Image (cartoon, coloured by chain):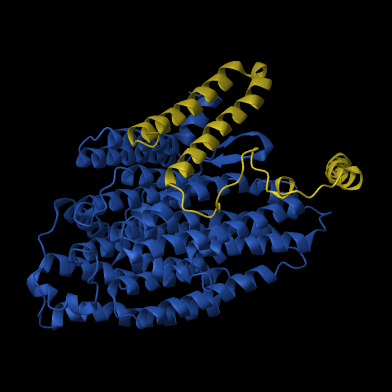
Amino acid sequence: MYEGLLMMFLAAGFIGAAAIGVGALLGPKRATPTTLAAYESGIPASGTARERFPVHFYLVAVLFIIFDIETAFFFPLAVKFGAAPQFLFAQAIIFVGILAVGYVYILRRGVLRW
Amino acid sequence: MTLPADFIVVSILGPAIVMLVFAMITLLFAVFQVDRSATASMALVGVGTAAVFALHLLMKGQQGAAEAGFGLRYLGDTPATAFTLVILLGTALAILVSEADLSRLGLDHPEYYPLMLLSATGAIVLASAGDLITLLLGLEIMSLAVYALAAWRQGSRQSEEAGMKYFLLGAFASALLIYGIALTFGAGGRFDYAGLAAAFSAPGFDAHVLALLGAVLLLAGLGFKVAFAPFHQWLPDVYTGAPTPVTTFMSVVVKTAAFAALLRIASTVFASLGAGPLGELLPIMLGILIGATLIVGNFGALLQSGVKRMLAYSAVAHAGYLGLAVLAADTVGTNAAIFYLTAYTLMTAGAFAVLSAITNADDRGDEIERFAGLAARRPFLAASLAIVLMSLAGLPPFAGFVGKLLVFQAAISAGYVALAVLGIATSVVAVVYYARVITYMYFRESDQETIRPLAPTLRIAVVIAVVGTIALGILPGFWYGLVERGQVLLAGF
């Protein structure tokens, strides 16, 4: 029953191990300060990451997740839309409506104001 | 006339939908800076509308359920709608208490009423859940809002500590509950209680250990919320640290919803496990929890010098009495618990309302000395508090007496005579600590500062609580009959 899932875990583990293992075995090893530095989107690292961040970053991250979930919710809805169009349309509208109230709330409370 | 199926679904979901809509309306009110008392009125209108829907369902005695895929069920039967009504009553009383005190205590942030309504929505979903997923959904909606409310007093270390403690232990309890849901699903292959009960009592069923483990974890997770000892540790600190209006809400609404869910699971899943080879273990565990709760709650309350903390321990003790009803949940226990929780909502909200009127500007000052000579200074408050405390102690002719009678009766009829005797014995202890407050109010001289005038909404809350406590005590059949047989009984049972 769960063979497919097991295969997927094995394949994922294999790909991960292969990506690191093959690189370690075959890749050239030159230890310069640049190659040893932590990779941070190509920009040279400066200072420690353990600082106090403004709480705004956190709020924006939470908002991003909420609206990300909204999108994720619509994919299965779109796939099954033909099964019960009126019902699913109403459901989507209600869902967006609730989120819209939340959106008005965060706008009015100045969460997106910097 | 037969109604289309969709309409029945909508009417079952009615109370929860109304509460959700009004939570959003109050949120919009709040952010567009509509006057706060208008927001409070709107919240009360929402609670009233939802109550009309729930009362309609209760009077019809409809036994239907809204079903979704995967065996998810939202119930609209008598226990679900009766508990919904109790939750709405508790919410209304909490709003009235809040309205009197929000600006005085510096709690006046726009999110207050929306969060309270959202939490009540979650409580209604929790009480109406017919499967484990809906249960979890309701529990989290209810709890997340209350965590924030518990920490509502900014700058108050006590309140922050209460919120943090409640959040961490609540998250821990949720983890236990989710693990229990996973194991129960693994054993029974279903999420809905009825399907699980059928699977557990089917002839070929052999996953007894897994099912028992799942049930124990479900019991532990819900045990945190209803505060069975030894899962009660958070409760005294959280109840004491949270602002009094929020404590009012937590102590009545959260407790009612959690007990509604526990009773439902006990009457289906636990009861069906009872016939299996390990079946006798679960009632024994529950019995030990209840015995410990009765002792810890009552003796803990005896040792407190602060009235708020005493009421917190008394909430633990009452969880023990309600536990007696859970033991008999598949027979008469559920109806007994509905009555008990109705009475408990009225008297506890009444007690916290009076406490809220007496505490000083920063929500402290709940020492028992502050109640000295209250009868001479504020006869209305003193008499009200005396009535609800006597009811909490279980003295006739008040509602608490009938509630205790019903749960003891339920426990004895289910064969738990020893626990019922322990309950009666600890009730005697309870009289001591409730009577101590009454003694201070009536027989001690006052040397305290004057108490500010009573806010009108607080007066309404106190009057509702006191009148309800007396009315349910004198005419219990009025509500019990509606719950038990769908009709109003005018005398006796």
Q: Residue drawn 18% across and 51% down?
A: B457
**Corner quadrant of residue B220:** bottom right
Left/right placement of residue B362 relative to residue B330 reads left
Q: Residue drawn 55% across and 51% down?
A: A47
Q: Residue drawn 8% across and 74% down?
A: B376
Can residue B493 be seen here? Answer: no
* Residue B67, position as x, y percentages in the image: 60, 35
Work out which quarter of the rendered image holds the C terminus of chain B and state it.
Answer: bottom left
Between B277 and B95, which is closer to the camera in this rendering?
Answer: B95
Can residue B178 be seen here? Answer: yes
Left/right placement of residue B99 relative to residue B21 reads left
* Residue B317, position as x, y percentages in the image: 43, 73
* Residue B95, position as x, y percentages in the image: 28, 49
Name the tint of chain B in the rendering. blue
In the rendered picture of this protein, how many numbered marks are placed on residues? Answer: 0
Q: Residue drawn 49% across and 58% down?
A: B259
Q: Which chain is yellow?
A: A
Between A37 and B221, which is closer to the camera in this rendering?
Answer: A37
**Corner quadrant of residue A74:** top right
Between A8 and A41, which is closer to the camera in this rendering?
Answer: A41
**Corner quadrant of residue B251:** bottom left
**Looking at this rendering, what residue extends furthest in the front direction?**
A32
